[in-house]
Amino acid sequence: MKLVGIDIGGTKILIVLIDSSGILKKRIEIPTTDATPLIVCGRILEQLKLLGSFESIGIGSAGDIDNKNGILRYSPNLYKWKNVKLKQYFEKKLTVPTVVDNDANCAAYGSYIVDGKKKYKNFITVTLGTGIGGGIIINGKLFRGSTGSAGEIGHMTINPDGPKCSCGNRGCLEAYIGAKGIIKTAAKMGLKNITPAIIADKARKGNRQAIMVYKKFSEYLAVGIGNLINIFNPDMLTFSGGVSNNWDLIEKRFFDELKKRAFKTPLEHIKIIKSKNPENLGAIGAALLSKR
Ligand SMILES: [Zn+2]
């Protein structure tokens, strides 16, 4: 049985074909462009028609998603996309059941199966990228909250007087460790016009300012994850997203700091790792969520 997963991002769309255990069979990337949703969906459709037969489609995207009706209400990275009826569109064109969910929820569900093999029933995935996202699984089921927005880990306040966040609040975790936050920390240390990946390269080559940037990052991350551990007492927590590729620069400082903040017994119990497939997790998870 084959499943399709689609991760619609601000710059690219990732389409994967997987088997029912999450093993990747095919992977296609197309640019998102600023064309209308109808044109972009048409391009996705062309690609899907080349994949052969599949059972279902799962679509993930950042933003406000009406999971019940399969509608992308709003996405911060796709300014032309408002109330796009994705489920209706693909079900009409391909007569294949389609589900739509928040990309961080998709990543969490994907990691729950691919990284955790369904053995860790209380499970959290934190995506470290342009923004900071999160998906929470409780007793083996995705926890969406009462109105569907649970898991906005990036917008927990860690300093009420902190820098302004993209959400309008001040001092959110994302304002410190989202891509913009990392770049701001770097600028304060004299590293200007630079990306998180270049800072990481410099840190690996021994640049002291760049090492400090990731040290700061790790400390803020530990504050956020310490809160999650104390509140949820999960079995496993994974990191995905582009910035998780710098785990080698984060790991040690992160665990040192986490020991100061998380309660002892839950911290001894929890397994924390970087996902084994962080780039494809959103699309793989979307596909797995569509399997019913
Ligand atoms: Zn925020």
Image (tube, rainbow, N blue to C red):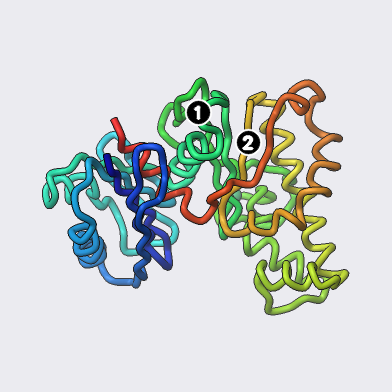
The kind of secondary structure element at disc 1 is loop
Residue 229 is situated, as x and y percent measured from the top left of the image, at: 69, 30
Question: In front: 261, or 156?
Answer: 261
Residue position marked by numbered label 1 in the rendering:
118
Viewer can see residue 272: yes
| Residue 66: image tag | none
Q: Is 176 left or right of 112, judged from the image as shown?
A: right
Residue 116 is situated, as x and y percent measured from the top left of the image, at: 55, 33
Ligand 1 is within 8 Å of the C-beta of the residue at disc 2: no
Q: Is 110 left or right of 84, judged from the image as shown?
A: right
Tell me the mark number nearer the camera, choosing from 2 and 1.
1
Q: Is residue 184 above or below residue 249?
A: below
Residue 45 is situated, as x and y percent measured from the top left of the image, at: 20, 60
For the residue carrying disc 2, how many other residues have a C-alpha within 10 Å: few (<14), some (14-19), or many (20+)?
Answer: many
Q: Quadrant of residue 33?
A: bottom left
The kind of secondary structure element at disc 2 is strand
Residue position marked by numbered label 2 in the rendering:
237
Q: Amino acid at mark 2?
A: Leu
Q: Is 175 left or right of 25, judged from the image as shown?
A: right
Q: Contact, CB < 8 Å: mark 2 with mark 1?
A: no
